[in-house]
């Protein structure tokens, strides 16, 4: 089923999606946006947990949470605890290229569907697991939740006010980045499959993902041996690089090099700051941030945000307003990039969704399917892939297999 590149890029690739909640569904949605056929397996009568995570709910009862990560998928209900359900699952695996799941560690092995067994069913299958802590190590059997990973993975120790409570990020960022890493690994495995025909066993953990994107903060500790601290909205290695309060509210300023600093000082009428040995270089500004930041705060408080943004943008110094979500989604740049789109949905009518950020003009991601209703495509899939007739499907319903 994995063929040469066409439009869309992953056309002909079939993904069996046994994941739920966020990390796995985000990964498979990205693959679906690129053209893969995503078959989302859900428990009969219940479905993905996030279907019930609201309010808000769209007209018809689907939660906004579920809608945001489940487009371009077909939903099939299947009781995986039943013998017949597992038999159908095996037949689906034989006709798939990729399997993604985020069950507790060893769940698939208990069903007789570990990696080796899967390779026997479907030679060359790419099998990706997403768990809290991975398949090795002392925490392998613990449940993994984004909030706990943000705490345990060090993120909350560097997020929040300098003197105050540690904060989590406002979205489930450990889940999202794990989904991104999983998608990257799957695409690399697809590339290798094209060359060798081999399958891959991919083990993605939320904790690993969280640690991987500590980037410079993690590196700061490894190089210096000094424990990173919280700086609120400031940067540990660049000054000034934080929020400041103008006379009518806050804005973000990021002076990234000494040339930008000199230009800013000139336009702000503070040439002496650029000549002050304490502030001449970024290294000195970092060391003397306690002296510089109050001076900048006093300066910025004298005028409105628009005044400072006009000056800063004119000289090419990075800056921006601190937008609310509505302001962000209505921003002319966001609109120009078509990052908010209208999608027709079976029960909710027309809904708005955040679009894919993957701008590939030669083969752009397309929303072919809206987020599915629970079990919406069960009969279609059983007929298409299994050859079941209407009576057989009804028998499966009566037996609570689907």
Image (cartoon, rainbow, N blue to C red):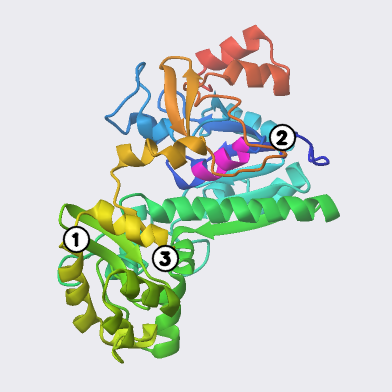
Gap between marks 2 and 3 measured at Cα: 40 Å
Q: Marks 3 and 2: in contact by CB < 8 Å?
A: no
**Badge 3 element:** loop
- Asked if residue 30 is among those painted magenta in the image, a careful observer would answer yes
Of callouts 2 and 3, the N-terminal one: 2
For label 2, the crowd category at 10 Å Cα-Cα, with few meaning under 14, some 14 to 19 and many 20 or more, is: some
Residue 127 percent location from the top left of the image: 65, 49
- Asked if residue 180 is among those painted magenta in the image, a careful observer would answer no
Q: Is 383 in front, or is 242?
A: 242
Of callouts 2 and 1, the N-terminal one: 2
Q: Is 112 in front, or is 50?
A: 50
Horizontal relation, residue 252 to residue 303: left or right: right
Q: Is 105 in front, or is 26?
A: 26
Which-is-in-front pick, marks 2 and 3? 2
Count of numbered labels shown in the rendering: 3
Residue 41 percent location from the top left of the image: 54, 32
Instruction: Tell me which segment is drawn in magenta.
Output: 26-33
Q: Residue at x 30, y 64 (%)?
A: 151
- What secondary structure is the stretch in magenta mostly built from? helix
Q: Residue at x 77, y 56 (%)?
A: 192
Q: Which mark is residue 245?
A: 1
Identify the residue under disc 3: 139
Horizontal relation, residue 202 to residue 141: left or right: right
Identify the residue under disc 2: 8
């Amino acid at each position: 089923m994995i063929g040469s590149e066409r439009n869309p890029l992953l056309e002909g690739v079939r993904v069996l999606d046994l994941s739920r909640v966020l990390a796995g569904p985000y990964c498979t949605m990205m693959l679906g946006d690129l053209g893969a056929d995503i078959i989302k397996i859900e428990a009969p009568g219940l479905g993905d947990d996030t279907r019930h995570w609201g309010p808000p709910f769209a007209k018809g009862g689907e939660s906004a949470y579920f809608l945001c990560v489940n487009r371009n998928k077909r939903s099939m209900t299947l009781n995986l605890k039943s013998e017949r359900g597992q038999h159908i699952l095996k037949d689906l695996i034989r006709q798939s290229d990729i399997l993604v799941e985020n069950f507790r560690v060893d769940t698939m092995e208990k069903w007789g569907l570990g990696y080796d067994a899967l390779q026997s069913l479907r030679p060359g299958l790419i099998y990706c697991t997403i768990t809290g802590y991975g398949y090795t190590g002392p925490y392998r059997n613990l449940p993994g939740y984004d909030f706990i990973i943000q705490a345990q993975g060090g993120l909350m120790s560097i997020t929040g006010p300098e003197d105050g409570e540690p904060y989590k990020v406002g979205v489930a960022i450990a889940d999202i980045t794990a989904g991104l890493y999983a998608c990257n690994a799957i695409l690399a495995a697809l590339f290798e499959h094209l060359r060798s025909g081999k399958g891959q066993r991919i083990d993605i953990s939320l904790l690993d993902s969280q640690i991987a994107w500590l980037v410079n903060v993690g590196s700061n500790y490894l190089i210096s041996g000094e424990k990173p601290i919280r700086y609120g909205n400031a940067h540990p290695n660049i000054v000034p690089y934080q929020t400041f309060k103008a006379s009518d509210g806050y804005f973000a300023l990021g002076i990234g090099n000494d040339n930008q600093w000199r230009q800013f000082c000139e336009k702000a009428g503070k040439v002496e700051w650029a000549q002050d040995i304490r502030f001449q270089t970024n290294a000195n500004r970092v060391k003397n941030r306690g002296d510089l930041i109050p001076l900048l705060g006093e300066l910025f408080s004298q005028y409105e945000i628009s005044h400072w943004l006009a000056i800063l943008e004119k000289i090419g110094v990075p800056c921006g307003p601190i937008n609310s979500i509505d302001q962000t989604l209505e921003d002319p740049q966001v609109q120009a990039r078509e990052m908010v789109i209208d999608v027709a949905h079976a029960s909710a009518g027309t809904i708005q969704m955040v679009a894919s950020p993957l701008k590939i003009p030669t083969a752009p991601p397309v929303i072919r399917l809206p987020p599915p209703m629970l079990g919406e495509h069960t009969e279609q899939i059983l007929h298409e892939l299994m050859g079941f007739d209407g009576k057989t499907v009804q028998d499966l319903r009566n037996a609570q297999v689907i």
